[in-house]
């Protein structure tokens, strides 16, 4: 049996870190949004061949270091189908090391695809539980839409959808290590925190300008030299007419939100001349 499933990227409209937990993780408060940029997965289910993955990017592992493989193993164990073999072919379109949840999105797509193949053996709640065990952002990528994410990012509360807009994403040639950035964050005093209540109020009003004015990511305050490039990209997006611009996740991708498609595409074309990856994408509603 062959199943095809898209793995949709995410952006952080806001990202706050409120403390470090005893288990070594950090408490997060984030407003997250699914976007139409996606990896394309082909999942082949057979008999007794184990679980493996392959990708158009050679450096991506094919074993359980890959969250998509880890998710498939967990799913087969949960439904009592360990004798099944699963081969996952991933066409990567989401940039790696961008803060857009590409690996988490692939894992989430595997869970959705396998549950479809096995005729919904797991409830949505059971799938979310498996996703949370697989990785911090996998639960969000599984459900999608516009969500308030707390805890490690696995506790989700639905929010009104992001107003219609066009989102220009730009990733410079470098990536930023998530553990490294958390370590730096622990050693600095943050300048400020996102106005989460104000962001939620803007979503409830359906006001894109009010939402964009409040977009904020505390990781931009860590003092890393690479944040200069992040600031430059933000400035260029704003110069092209973006209502707001912010880094997503732990970076290094930056996005700007536009009301006008033409402005978004012009910004993308100009940024593409200077930086490694650039695309125009749109918000996506819930997937489950």
Image: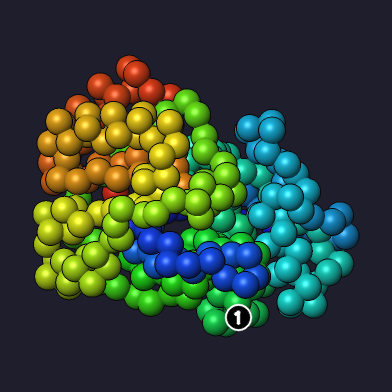
The image shows residue 94, relative to residue 285, as above or below, that is above
Q: What residue is shown at x 22% (from left), y 32% (from top)?
A: 235
Q: Secondary structure at mark 1?
A: helix
Q: Quadrant of the N terminus?
A: bottom right
Position in image of residue 24 (x %, y %): 63, 65
Q: What residue is shown at x 27% (from left), y 68% (from top)?
A: 196
Colouring style: rainbow
Regarding residue 108, the answer to whether it shows in the image is yes
The image shows residue 277, relative to residue 157, as above or below, that is above
Neighbour class for label 1 at 10 Å: few (<14), some, many (≥20)?
few
Regarding residue 40, the answer to whether it shows in the image is no
In the shown orientation, is residue 183 left or right of residue 280? right
In the shown orientation, is residue 211 left or right of residue 221? left
- The foreground one among 92 and 140 is 140
Position in image of residue 272 (x %, y %): 33, 23
The image shows residue 160, relative to residue 98, as above or below, that is below
In the shown orientation, is residue 57 left or right of residue 63? left
- The foreground one among 111 and 31 is 31
- The foreground one among 88 and 71 is 71
Q: What residue is shown at x 56% (from left), y 75% (from top)?
A: 128
The number of callouts visible is 1
- The foreground one among 134 and 75 is 134
Q: Which residue is mark 1?
A: 126
Name the image quarter holding residue 25.
Answer: bottom right
Q: What residue is shown at x 25% (from left), y 54% (from top)?
A: 215
Position in image of residue 271 (x %, y %): 29, 24
Q: Quadrant of the C terminus?
A: bottom left
In the shown orientation, is residue 38 left or right of residue 190? right
């Amino acid at each position: 049996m062959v199943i095809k499933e898209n793995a949709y990227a995410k952006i952080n409209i806001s990202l706050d870190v409120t403390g470090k937990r005893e288990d070594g993780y950090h408490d997060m408060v984030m407003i997250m949004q699914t976007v139409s940029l996606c990896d394309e997965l082909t999942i082949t289910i057979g008999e007794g061949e184990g679980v493996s993955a392959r990708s158009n990017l050679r450096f991506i592992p094919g074993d359980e270091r890959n969250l998509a493989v880890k998710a498939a193993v967990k799913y087969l164990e949960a439904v009592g189908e360990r004798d099944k073999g699963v081969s996952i072919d991933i066409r990567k379109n989401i940039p790696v090391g961008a803060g857009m949840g590409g690996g988490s999105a692939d894992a989430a797509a595997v869970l959705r695809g396998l549950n479809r193949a096995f005729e919904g053996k797991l409830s949505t709640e059971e799938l979310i539980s498996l996703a949370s065990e697989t990785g911090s952002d996998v639960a969000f990528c599984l459900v999608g839409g516009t969500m308030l994410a707390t805890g490690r990012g696995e506790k989700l509360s639905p929010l009104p959808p992001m107003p219609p807009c066009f989102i220009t994403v730009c990733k410079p040639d470098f990536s930023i290590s998530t553990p490294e950035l958390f370590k730096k964050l622990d050693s600095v005093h943050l300048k400020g925190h996102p106005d989460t209540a104000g962001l939620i109020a803007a979503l409830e009003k359906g006001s894109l300008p009010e939402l964009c004015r409040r977009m904020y990511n505390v990781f931009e305050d860590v003092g890393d030299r690479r944040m200069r490039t992040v600031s430059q990209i933000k400035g260029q997006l704003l110069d092209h007419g973006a209502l707001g611009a912010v880094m997503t996740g732990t970076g290094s991708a930056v996005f700007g939100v536009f009301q006008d498609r033409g402005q978004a595409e012009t910004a993308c074309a100009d940024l593409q001349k200077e930086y490694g990856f650039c695309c125009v994408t749109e918000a996506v509603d819930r997937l489950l």
